């Protein structure tokens, strides 16, 4: 699975975004080490705080289906039908990803026309994780 293909799946996942309050629609595609891809979109709520980001939707779907090891995630977002140049994962999603992803996990951002790829350790250096509880 190339970064470009994963990005295309994130764009498709964004179609299902439920964002009536912010209007900011996000899609994610998470590649499991099995080769399976788990899509996710943001799911907002009238009470606001129960809102779930696209990245966490994808992670929770994957873990609930029995997969816990991942190679990469692509993320796209933007207002309405517009795709932003860059949609970085929020801090909460970075922490959730840290639970399951190695330092070399790839985070694919940008747009299908201009892809930028980062290692997870670039996005969340010095993270707190299960190693700290051992
Ligand atoms: N959002 C995501 O889905 N992922 C992020 O990493 C950043 C924010 C969503 C949450 C909310 O529905 C909307 O974008 C505006 O914050």
Image: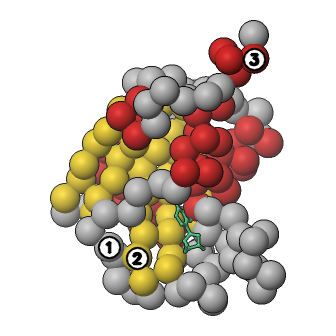
Tag 3: Cα neighbours inside 10 Å, few (<14), some, or many (≥20)?
Answer: few
Element on which disc 2 rests: strand
Q: Are marks 3 and 2 in contact (CB under 8 Å)?
A: no
Report the Cα–Cα distance between label 3 and label 2: 37 Å
Nearer to us in this view, 79 or 130: 130
Q: Which corner quadrant holds the N terminus?
A: top left
Query: In this orientation, does residue 99 appear?
Result: yes
Q: Is mark 1 within 8 Å of ligand 1?
A: no
Q: Provide residue 7's location: percent of width, then percent of height.
A: 36, 55
Which residue bears the numbered disc 2? 78
Q: Residue at x 44, y 30 (%)?
A: 125
Q: Earlier in the sequence, mark 1 or mark 3?
A: 1
Tag 1: Cα neighbours inside 10 Å, few (<14), some, or many (≥20)?
Answer: some
Which residue bears the numbered disc 3? 133
Which residue bears the numbered disc 1? 84
The image quadrant in which ligand 1 is located:
bottom right
Q: Are marks 1 and 2 in contact (CB under 8 Å)?
A: yes
């Amino acid at each position: 699975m190339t970064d470009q293909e994963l990005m295309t799946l994130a764009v498709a996942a964004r179609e299902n975004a439920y964002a009536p309050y912010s209007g900011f629609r996000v899609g994610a595609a998470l590649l499991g080490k099995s080769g399976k891809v788990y899509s996710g979109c943001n799911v907002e709520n009238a009470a606001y705080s129960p809102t779930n980001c696209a990245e966490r939707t994808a992670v929770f779907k994957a873990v609930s289906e029995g997969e816990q090891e991942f190679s990469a995630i692509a993320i796209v977002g933007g207002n309405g039908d517009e795709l932003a140049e860059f949609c970085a994962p929020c801090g909460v999603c970075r922490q959730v990803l840290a639970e399951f992803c190695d330092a070399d996990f790839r985070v694919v951002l940008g747009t299908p026309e201009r892809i930028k790829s980062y290692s997870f350790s670039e996005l969340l250096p010095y993270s707190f994780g299960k190693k700290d509880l051992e």
